[in-house]
């Protein structure tokens, strides 16, 4: 699971009002190089929740993203784009869990795949 | 030259996973028929709901493969074996999609609302007894309850929420699902529709219907709602509204 996907997931348990972002518990992290695409990154920047990305990326061992939401102008910096690209698309949570911030319920991540299936009493 | 769609010999399989069949081929043919429009569309986020063998999402990734803007692919399935098989099919073709095991798009709704530019979906559309809906394994790929609409009717409002302003939905519908009624329901939500591929086999008549938001329909819906509120809808207006609703099959506007 890439951190872009993490940025789009929230706890879907019935009654949970504050299910985003899911906290990451990382057991195995892998990195897979992907070709950088500045057009895609610029497009995606506006769709992201920045702080959850910074936090998730730090949990995954990468602390080089700026803490505060950067100004759009940073998208012209190759150095920034490289870090943004790496955090968003190259770091994978291979094994671990995503934890609901409200209830503590863990959604397992196995072989890189988050399991968001709910139990009967959670729907 | 690399193939433009997934190759059957590279599609992985499992006894509990639906293999690519006529419906899957028709959906991919619709995407191929729309290839130049899809490339022009430059979707950033693409989602398949119910990826099964992975044949469709792999083909979509291959079709859009050389788009300069790049795209991010996500696919869901309720069946864990389907997720595994899709992962193998993607890898065999050298493409990538993020896979999430979930029911329709549960866990993505909310954050992903309004962000998805292309949704593809080959839903469980076969009319079956109601109690067959929601079973595990391969039954989840086809059991559709009454008129085959049980799961389709759950997916449509979710797709409406997830699709961006410019978003497109491609969905497989069977004649028994009453596609014209599905299109009317989507029209109420502001969507225009077009049949991209229609195909009859010995057993079924398949439609691949494309839906997109149409500002004119949205305005029309708002007007007719306010008229209904004011209670001054005249018989003639009502007639024309009916007419325009019935004419959607022939709409030849852009998409």
Image: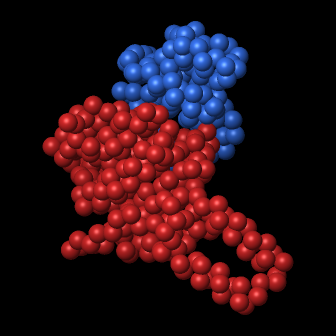
- The chain letter corresponding to blue is A
Camera-side residue of B193 and B92? B193
Q: Position of residue B22 (x, y in %)?
A: 25, 61
Q: Is residue A87 left or right of residue B144?
A: right
Q: Is residue B226 in view?
A: yes
Tell me which corner region of the image, top left, top right, bottom left or bottom right, holds residue B47: top left
Q: Position of residue B199 (x, y in %)?
A: 29, 69
Residue at left 54%, top 41%?
A: B108
Q: Is residue A7 left or right of residue B31?
A: right
Q: Is residue B99 in view?
A: no
Quarter of the picture containing the N terminus of chain B is top left
Residue at left 36%, top 27%?
A: A111
Is the residue B215 above or below the residue B49 in the image?
Answer: below
Tell me which corner region of the image, top left, top right, bottom left or bottom right, holds residue B101: top left
Camera-side residue of A18 and B173? B173
Is the residue A58 above or below the residue B199 in the image?
Answer: above
Camera-side residue of A102 and A94? A94
Q: Is residue B250 left or right of residue B58?
A: right
Is the residue B191 above or below the residue B31 in the image?
Answer: below
- The chain letter corresponding to red is B
Tell me which corner region of the image, top left, top right, bottom left or bottom right, holds residue A30: top left
Q: Is residue A76 left or right of residue A34?
A: right
């Amino acid at each position: 699971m890439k951190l872009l996907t993490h940025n789009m997931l929230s706890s879907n348990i019935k009654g949970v009002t504050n299910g985003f972002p899911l906290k990451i518990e990382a057991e195995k992290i892998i990195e897979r190089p992907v070709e950088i695409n500045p057009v895609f990154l610029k497009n995606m920047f506006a769709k992201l929740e920045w702080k959850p990305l910074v936090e998730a990326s730090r949990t995954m061992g990468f602390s080089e993203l700026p803490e505060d939401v950067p100004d759009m102008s940073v998208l012209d910096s190759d150095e920034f784009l490289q870090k943004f690209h790496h955090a968003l698309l190259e770091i994978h949570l291979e094994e671990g869990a995503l934890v609901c911030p409200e209830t503590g319920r863990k959604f397992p991540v196995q072989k890189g795949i988050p399991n968001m299936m709910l139990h009967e009493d959670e729907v | 030259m690399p193939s433009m769609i997934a190759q059957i010999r590279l599609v992985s399989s499992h006894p509990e996973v639906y293999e690519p069949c006529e419906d899957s081929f028709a959906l991919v043919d619709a995407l191929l028929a729309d290839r130049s429009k899809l490339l022009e569309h430059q979707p950033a986020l693409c989602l398949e709901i119910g990826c099964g063998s992975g044949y469709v999402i792999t083909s979509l990734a291959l079709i859009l493969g050389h788009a300069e803007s790049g795209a991010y692919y996500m696919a869901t399935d309720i069946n864990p074996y389907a997720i595994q098989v899709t992962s193998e099919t993607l890898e065999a073709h050298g493409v990538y999609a993020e896979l999430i095991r979930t029911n329709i798009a549960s866990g993505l709704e909310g954050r992903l609302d309004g962000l998805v530019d292309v949704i593809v979906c080959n839903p469980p559309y076969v009319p079956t007894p109601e109690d067959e809906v929601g079973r595990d394994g391969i039954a989840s790929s086809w059991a559709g309850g009454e008129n085959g609409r049980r799961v389709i009717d759950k997916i449509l409002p979710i797709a409406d929420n997830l699709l961006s302003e410019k978003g497109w939905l491609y969905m497989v519908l069977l004649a028994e699902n009453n596609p014209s009624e599905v299109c009317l329901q989507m029209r109420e939500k502001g969507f225009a529709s077009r049949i991209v591929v229609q195909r009859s086999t010995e057993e079924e008549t398949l439609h691949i219907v494309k839906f997109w938001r149409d500002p004119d329909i949205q305005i029309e819906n708002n007007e007719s709602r306010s008229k209904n509120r004011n209670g001054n809808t005249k018989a003639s207006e009502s007639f024309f509204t009916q007419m325009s609703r019935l004419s959607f099959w022939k709409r030849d506007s852009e998409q």
